Image (tube, grey):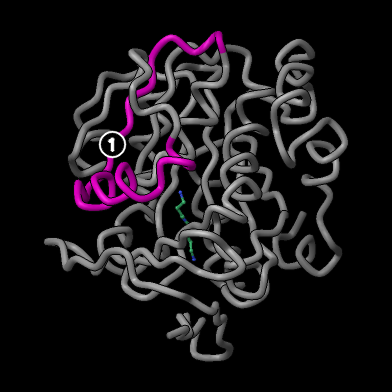
Amino acid sequence: MAFWVDETFEGVCRVSVEAEEQLYSKQSEFQLVEIFQTKGFGRVLTIDGMFMTSERDEHFYHEMLVQPPLNCAPSIERVLVIGGGDGGTVREVLSHKEVEKVVMVEIDGVVVDASKKYLSSIGRAWEDPRLELRIADGIEYVKNAPSGSFDVVLLDHSDPVGPAEGLFNIAFYKDCRRVLTEKGVLAMQSESPLLQRDTFLEIKSTLSDVFDVIHPYFSFVPLYGLGGWSFTFASNQVDPLVLVDRRVAFQEERCKHYNRDIHRGTFALPNDLKRGLKI
Ligand code: SPD
């Protein structure tokens, strides 16, 4: 019997997906992790009732979190991913042959185990020997990691409630800056610019106290808050519009969504957002 899986978003709207079966449900130490078989989106992962990813629309999110920073960073040998328990982000990172090592730090092993079992079409790189998976607190990890030890840091966290809350503050961003090399880059998901405008603007303003170059970018992820979604790029020296040609050419062959034109376009912001961001 079909049923509807809903996310009530910021108390102002509801995104609803028709499901055929609940495949998994477990209350972990941190959150309620559920996976549904749906009619239109394939398998869908929710955490505490919030849509995290789906087989049908995951590429919009994972490609856009990973490909813009990895195709402009001067060096991409060592990459740190915080969160990303479904495995989509590390899959995108590891598609780059220049990447030598990825450390992924996910706080909730239940998300990883469930994703390995039910979302293997998303996390296709778990067996890659360049991946070091740690089930641990990302905040503690960056606090203790050596300075200058990563070329890229990617923050693939859920919304700023529950275990992800501490990943949105200046102390954490300062540690991220410290673990990056001088020409390192950071990218993070930065919520809905329409329905979580204050959070979106605050991320940019907090990052500006830590990094010299900040570029919020705008894309869409159908399952998230009516679709309009943002990411933010930060660095001290790197211009995100200067691409490493050979990498982009390779990604244009394999990606479903990302290409050179999308890269350029994603950094073009609507006037209303530019005014809010004061850029
Ligand atoms: N509102 C949902 C935000 C979730 C962002 N992270 C999703 C994890 C996908 N790897």
In this view, the residue farthest toward the left is 29
Where does the image place residue 124, in percent across and percent down from the top left?
A: 45, 32
- The residue that label 1 is drawn on is 105
Q: Which residues are magenta?
A: 97-123
Residue 129 seen in this snapshot: yes
Residue in the image at 27% along x and 64% along y: 24
Residue in the image at 51% along x and 81% along y: 9
Give neighbour class at mark 1: few <14, some 14-19, many 20+ (Cα, 10 Å): many
Decide if residue 33 is on the left or right side of residue 55.
left
Where does the image place residue 112, in percent across and percent down from the top left?
A: 28, 45
User: In the displayed structure, would residue 214 be above or below residue 108?
Assistant: above
Q: Is residue 109 magenta?
A: yes
Where does the image place residue 215, in percent across and percent down from the top left?
A: 68, 44
User: In the displayed structure, would residue 51 be above or below residue 218?
Assistant: below
> Which residue is more in the foreground, 43 or 174?
43
| Circle 1: residue type | Val
